[in-house]
Structures are given as structure tokens and as C-alpha cells.
Image (spheres, rainbow, N blue to C red):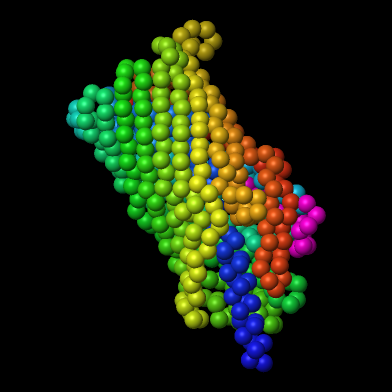
Amino acid sequence: MSNGAELGSGTCKLLIYAALASTLTASQPAYAGGLLFWEVGTPTLGTAGAGWAAMPEDASTAFTNPAGTVWRESTEIMAAGQLLYGHLDFSDGGESNVPGNDGGNAIEWFPGGGFFAAGRLNENFGWGFSVSGNFGGSVAYDSQWKGRRFVRKVDLLSGNIMPSLSWRASDKVSLGLGFILATGYYRFESSPRAGIIPGDASLRYDDTQVSPGGSLGVIYKPSSDMVLGMTYTSTISWDFNYQLQLKNFGPLFGPLAEQFNGRNLRINVDVPQTLTASVQQRLSPTATVYANLNWQHWSEFGYFGLEIDNPAQVSVTLNRNYKDTWHGAIGIRHKFDSGTLQDWSLSAGIAYDSGMVNTENRTADLVTDAAWRLGIGGQKELCYGLRLDLGYTLLWFGDTDIDQTGRPPFNPRLQGTYQNYSVNFFGASLQRSF
């Protein structure tokens, strides 16, 4: 009896940790190389993110590069809104071993956006303020889908407040520093096997944490037609700490699950540091091109810690085998001086993000891969001091394979393909100059 209890206890721990370890991730579903995305409703929607750190011509520079605020000629505020719609449908490849359906579309409509303000204190100092978020994701599968042993619903939502200051060191160079206060909300739900009986148990966890971070920026203007920009954002660490909720385990595992139910579970999540270099080059009075190069430290995000308060102060550090990612983008904006589109500026862009995980390490809570971006946008001054921007970006992953396996004793498996995986971003912003 003692040996059986010890075996059952160890199995219960494996089930709980396997479910948690296979699901840490997901403010808008997971996109690009990882969970950091370029779409926050700002004018960069129309260039697929190109020029991100080298666009000091509107208030959104308070978020994208704090060094740009000192170049403002007036005080500007921008309100940006965005809607996201995804297509994340799983198609079983024939090797999945948990009965159920294909889960439906796991990403549907989701709102986003931000508020941005920027101006100058004097000739040499500028200020900025932004409320936004470009990290996280949300997926929700059908309750009876084949991958419910791993995940049914997961949200990792973020929102940042960032005040900043900038200093013009010369007529060509400015530096910026932003302080980030990042709020993270994490919720996870899955349906582990109840035990020997082939039913569904329930595992749930949710918590909200606030942590600090920072952003550094540089703007260099070698000529009146060129802007070079670079930004660095620091790691942000959230230590989620909440009661683990376990229900409906069978007769064998029920008493053991009760040992963990209600215990504080601490989960450490690190938002990765990033480095972005951008350029803006004016080709003519009506045409400007933009470009980006970016690095994101996703291998750091792949390590996370789990710790349960009793029994036995269980703790472990897990590695999801993530890789650092790279991003490149190029875009163009053209202003029309005559014709039907007079006073409109139209933009287009294309970008590529490398993948952060190989197929053998991909999990159903964070379905991500290498991806292409295509963006289009329009910009017009509606009246003096009031500017409208419209933008759309398609994020295309294509067919993304998954083969996720769980741990003994039940060894659940999810094998198949997310076919034509894509995400659509629709955004608009209004900027007022004073």
C-alpha cells in the first residue's frame, strides 16, 4: 500500500507538472517569431513594422523609440485602436490518441491599441508617455478538443505604461530613456485525464503581476533626408503566484490531487530583451522608404520556473527549447499631390520573422513559427492639426505542424497541422497636434 501511494503521488506530480510545463505562454495571440508583435494600431501597421525605431514624426515614437520625442515641433497626442482576427484551426494527422474534436478556431476577434503623447520641454529635452502593450496572446479551444490534456484556454495579456525623457545631444543625435511599468495577466486551463477512468479532470490557474522594465533609444540624423534609429528594451520578469485549482480527479488520483489543490503555485515568466535598428530614407519630396532589423532573446523566455508551496516545497526549472529570433522589414510611403488620392499618403511593407521553436518542441498553447507580414496603410490630414491613419497587416504562418506528447503514465499525443494559419490586424489612429 505504501509503495502504491508513493507511485500514485509521483504520477500525480508528473501529471500536474506536465500540464503546466506544456502551457506557459500565450494582449493578443502569439505572433511573429514569438509573443512580441509589431501591431499596436499605430501608422507602422501600413509598413508591416518597417521603420519602427526611426519614425520620430508622430506621437507613437513615445512607444517605439523614446529618443524621438525631442524632435517634435508641437505637443501631439495619438489614440490608436485595433481589431485582430485569426485563423488557427487544427487538423488531426491521424496519430493523436485522445478522443475529441479538432478544437475549432482558437483565435477570434480581439481588441487592442494604445494612447501616445509626445512633446518638448525646451530645445534640448523632450518628453513622452504611452499606454500600450505588444507582448502576449490568447487562445481558446473547444472544451472537447483532442489537445485538451495539454491546454484548453490560455491568456498571457500585458499592458504597459511608459513615461520617457529624451535629450538632443546635437543637431543630429538624440538619446531617450523610458521607464516601463508592465502589468501581466496569466490564466491557464486544461483538462488532464482524471486517472484510471478515461474522464476529464480540471486544472486552472490565474494571476496578475506588475513588474518594471526599461527602454533605451538613439536617433541619428546624418542628413535632412535620412533618419537612423535604434532601441533596446530590457527583460521584464513576472513572478505569478496564485492558488492552483484542481477538480474532478478520479478515485485513485483524487486524494493526491487534493494535496496540491489550493496550494500557491509560483510561475516565473521573463519577457525577453530586444534590440531594433531602423532606417528612414526620403527618396523624393513624395516618397520615403523604411527598413528594420531586430533581434529578440526568446531562448531566455524558454526557461521558466515552477514552484509549489508544499507538499515538500516542489520546485523545478523547465526549458522549452526556444531559439532567439530575427526580424527584417522594408516598406514605402508615397504622398499624392494630385488626382483622386490628393493629400493622401499610401504605404505598403513586407517583413519576415524567423521561428522560435522547431516542430518537435512546438506546443498547442503557443502555436508559432516563421512568418511573413504584408502591410498596407493610408494617411491623411483631415484638417489643420488632425491626422488620420488607417492600416492593415496580414501575418501569414501557412501550414504549421505539431507533434506534442505528454508524460507517463497516459502519454497523451497531439499530432497534426494548423492549416493556413494566419492573423489579420485592422487598425486606425487619430493624432492631434497642439
Residue 398 higher or lower than 195, as above or below: above
Q: Could you tell me which quadrant the N terminus lies in?
A: bottom right
Relative side of 106 to 183, left or right: right
Q: Residue furthest top?
A: 338
Relative side of 172 to 411, left or right: left
Q: Residue at x 58, y 80 (%)?
A: 258
Residue 270 higher or lower than 218, as above or below: below
Magenta span dominant secondary structure:
loop
Image x and y of residue 84, in percent: 57, 40
Residue 96 placement: quadrant: bottom right
Image x and y of residue 247, in percent: 62, 74
Q: Residue furthest right?
A: 94
Residue 404 higher or lower than 348, as above or below: below
Q: How many marks?
A: 0
Q: Can residue 204 be seen at all in this image of the molecule?
A: yes
Residue 94 placement: quadrant: bottom right
Q: Residue at x 55, y 77 (%)?
A: 260
Q: Can residue 375 be seen at all in this image of the molecule?
A: no
- Whether residue 83 is in magenta: the answer is no
Viewer-proximal residue, 334 or 7?
7
Image x and y of residue 63, in percent: 38, 38
Image x and y of residue 16, in percent: 59, 71
Q: Could you tell me which quadrant the C terminus lies in?
A: top left
Q: Residue at x 71, y 67 (%)?
A: 411
**Which residues lie in the magenta part?**
93-107
Viewer-proximal residue, 370 or 373?
370
Q: Residue at x 50, y 39 (%)?
A: 326
